[in-house]
Amino acid sequence: MPEPLKNLLHEALVGDMADRISGNAPTFDKNRFVTLATEGLTALELMERSALIRDALFATLPGDFREAAAMLKASLPAPDRPGLSGWMLLPVNQFIAARGPDHFDLGLDLLKALTPHFTAEYGIRPFIHRDQQRALAIISSWVDDPDQHVRRLASEGTRPRLPWAMRLPQLVKDPAPILPILTALMDDPEDYVRRSVANSLNDIAKDHPDLVAAFIASHIGGASSKRRWLLKHASRTLLKKGHAQALANFGFAAAASLECELRLRNAEVMFGEGLDFEIRVTNAGERAQSLMIDYAIHHVKSDGSLSPKVFKCKAIMLAPGQSHTIGRRHAMRPITTRRYYPGEHRIAILVNGAETASQSFVLVMPSPDRA
């Protein structure tokens, strides 16, 4: 079994933190820090451990944030010595998030210095929440920073719906203030940064689909292959939902004169096995068509209703009169993000966002003696 995440923060790491801070700040009481940061540590989960270490920093760093920030910044890695890095910086992020917003520029500067050594995207969000205009004015200047981690922080830290992080309700409601940041980073030389831009746009699309579809349309003309990939990745939620403008952005107009046949090889599926099916599409029209073929599994919920989940399948070009056959197996096995219920499910085929064929199948749960 994989090592539990909580073990990323452990007693030896706390000792290393103490040594690296005290090596740059002789007045730091490393013994007290270690005592406070390890008391009951092993009984806690990851974020609880981080909070315990953060509280030990509260108790042992100077009460004046300017002094504390200077000590932490001096304790970051340098070419000639090791410093605070990796998971050591998770509780440091929490420390800055709690005390930094009262010292706005200094706190953001510290997070900027920290991010090459560990993500600062969680620590930055309380600053945006406190004073969005002021924070974004500073963060916007980072898009030209020579360090890729700082540039990525500008896009990742401002994502309205960053997973596992504080939501930014003002940006969820109106994402316009971060669009200039995303535009500036759209052709960044690092894939690491471009992926963050795509993920931020995909976040925005969940609340403002037409805005993102229009944004993509305005930036796709003459796009390089790298930018085109970014824009398509940013459109993934819209494409799955069959948003007309998003599909048109990538050449997928509403399908016309299309014949679609769905064949199930097994209309009854035992949980833990898979649904085998075949899709055959024929272009009965007089023009070639670009087709994005997806499928949706309509899962049975606890109340007996159905909830669809769309899965990517294949993009093809069909000449007039041409047919194409696709075979797939969809696994119906335990996953952490879904609870399965027995009963009649449905599979639907989507071509350029429109449902073109569907059939029902039955999911059977194994009896207790087979489980």
Image (tube, helix red, strand yellow):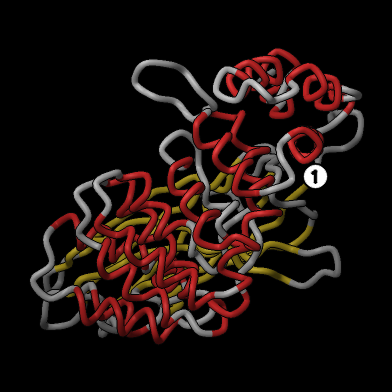
- Residue nearer the viewer, 219 or 343: 219
Quadrant (top left/top right/bottom left/bottom right) for the C terminus: top right
Q: Residue furthest left?
A: 222
Q: Is residue 350 left or right of residue 187?
A: right
How many numbered badges does the structure rendering display?
1
* 360 vs 165, nearest the viewer: 165
Q: Amino acid at mark 1?
A: Met
Identify which residue is drawn at 22% across, 54% down: 188
Q: Residue 243: x percent and y percent? A: 40, 81
Q: Is residue 46 visible?
A: no
Tag 1 residue = 365
Q: Residue furthest front?
A: 27
In the picture, measured across the screen, residue 336 lies left or right of residue 225, that is right
Q: What residue is shown at x 31% (from left), y 85% (from top)? A: 214
Mark 1, other Cα within 10 Å: few <14 / some 14–19 / many ≥20: some
In the picture, measured across the screen, residue 59 lies left or right of residue 324, that is right
Report the front residue among 331 and 174: 174
Q: Vertically, is 267 above or below 270?
A: below
Residue 277 x, y percent position in the rendering: 48, 52
Q: Residue 87: x and y, percent?
A: 60, 30
Image quarter hosting the N terminus? top right
Looking at the image, is 158 positioned above or below residue 73?
below
**Residue 134 higher or lower than 340, as above or below:** below
Q: Quadrant of residue 335?
A: top right
Local SS, label 1: loop
| Residue drawn at point x = 23 percent, y = 72 percent | 250
Please indicate, yes or no, whether residue 34 appears anywhere in the rendered image: yes
Q: Image quarter for residue 226?
A: bottom left
For the point 65% across and 63% down, the residue is 102
Looking at the picture, how far across and down is residue 156, in whole percent? 45, 56
